[in-house]
Amino acid sequence: MLRFLTAGESHGQALVTIVDGVPAGLTIDFDAVTAQLRRRQGGYGRGRRMAIESDRASALSGIRHGRSTGAPIALLIPNKDWSNWQKTMYVEPEQPEGSGGVDRPAVTRPRPGHADLAGAVKYGHDDIRDVLERASARETAARVAVGALARQLLACIEVEIGSHVFTIGAASLPDPLAITFDLIRALPDDGPLHCVDAAIEQQMIAEIDRAREAGDTMGGSFEVIAHRVPPGLGSYVQWDRKLDGRLAQAMMSIPAIKAVGIGRGPAVASLPGSRIHDEILPSVPSHPTSVGVVRPTNNAGGLEGGVTNGEDLRVSGYMKPIATLMKPLRSVDLTTMAESPAAIERSDVCAVPAAAVVGEAMVAIVLADAAMEKFGGDTVDEFVRSWQATRDKTLARFQSR
């Protein structure tokens, strides 16, 4: 089982994550981890925080001489803005001498759409900062670091993962499923919104600009595609082993994601079965596949019955607008219970491209866990040999017909 935990606050000293279940012998490319963290910080519509942080993850355990040992891997991502928050976020009972930054007042006006009010009720906090610091999407930097390790494990069995943004506000691609993995692979990491259509991307930018000028925020949607996913990951025999359910939970755990789609997604509710179910046809030598058959469509998004079927895995996430507005919505000051404008925290106007990178990480983590479940092994060599044997057996089964 591949599992992880994170710790840390948005303006605390650092983010920390512990990853358990990475087999021994995986060569770790730290530059690739940094590249994924950098991708998360990009995208048109991001706020001032991205100009401050330049995330890097350092390993504290579980890696020796550049290779995983099989022990839990601990990663540390320092918050470079910590020096400006020491007077607000110190951990000692009393503020240490020489602390930097500003001693900020308690946050008492919850933001509609954020965890502020629900968290304050649940944990009994008077200062909502105790909620917002942990509920902040800053925590997803640690997930992206974990996802970068998962991607490197998946690369050993030839799986690739990418994403693209297909909606910002009213600007949207007409059919996201028409976008191939090759188109996504060709997108530059430093593109403004990671959209495959330049004209629609400009419409998306205009949507963000209008929101910024109005003191508002903007949401959107993205799709994660996993390419060359082995068939047979997941299971239909129990509810909690279905891979689509595991992927949906992972995607919904990303801050501000309010819906998840697999393949055609919500459109399956409005179309007849003859236009939704992917026909199964004999394969041809010019189009080899991992399961000996071809599909002219992939409306199922690579999953049937909670099991991967050899097609590209396609998972979409739908992100609501960010809860911090520069022209805040109405709220209540919890100290007086009088109506008051919601609190304002430093924030983005739009973070859909960043959410897509986090979505890639979560898909990678779930797939790596499912692959370890299927192929097993305490070492990477054992893991790869099992995958190769399963692949060869499956191909031989269909070739013998």
Image: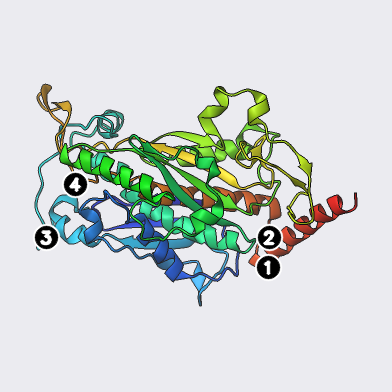
**In the rendered image, which residue does mark 2 sit on?**
377
- Considering only order in the chain, which callout, 4 or 1, is on the residue closer to the N terminus? 4
Q: CA distance from mark 1 to mark 2?
A: 8 Å
249 with respect to 368 (left or right):
left
Instruction: Compare residues 67 and 121 and report the one nearer the observer.
Output: 67
**In the rendered image, which residue does mark 4 sit on?**
346
Q: CA distance from mark 2 to mark 3?
A: 48 Å
Residue at the (66%, 50%) spot, across then down: 373
Residue type at tag 2: Gly
Q: Position of residue 64 (x, y in %)?
A: 51, 74
User: Looking at this rendering, what residue extends furthest in the front direction?
Assistant: 199
User: Looking at this rendering, what residue extends furthest in the right direction?
Assistant: 401
Assess disc 1: are there few (<14), some (14-19) or many (≥20) residues with their C-alpha within 10 Å of its C-alpha.
some
Residue at the (73%, 52%) spot, across then down: 289
Q: CA distance from mark 1 to mark 4?
A: 46 Å
Q: Position of residue 63 (x, y in %)?
A: 50, 70
Select label 2 or label 4 by which is in front.
4
Q: CA distance from mark 2 to mark 4?
A: 45 Å
Select label 1 or label 2 by which is in front.
1
Residue type at tag 4: Arg
Assess disc 4: are there few (<14), some (14-19) or many (≥20) residues with their C-alpha within 10 Å of its C-alpha.
few
Residue type at tag 1: Asp
Q: CA distance from mark 4 to mark 3?
A: 19 Å
- Name the disc covering residue 381, or none: 1
Occupied quadrant, residue 253: top left
Residue at the (59%, 62%) spot, across then down: 155
In contact (CB < 8 Å): disc 1 and disc 2: yes
Assess disc 3: are there few (<14), some (14-19) or many (≥20) residues with their C-alpha within 10 Å of its C-alpha.
some
- Considering only order in the chain, which callout, 3 or 1, is on the residue closer to the N terminus? 3
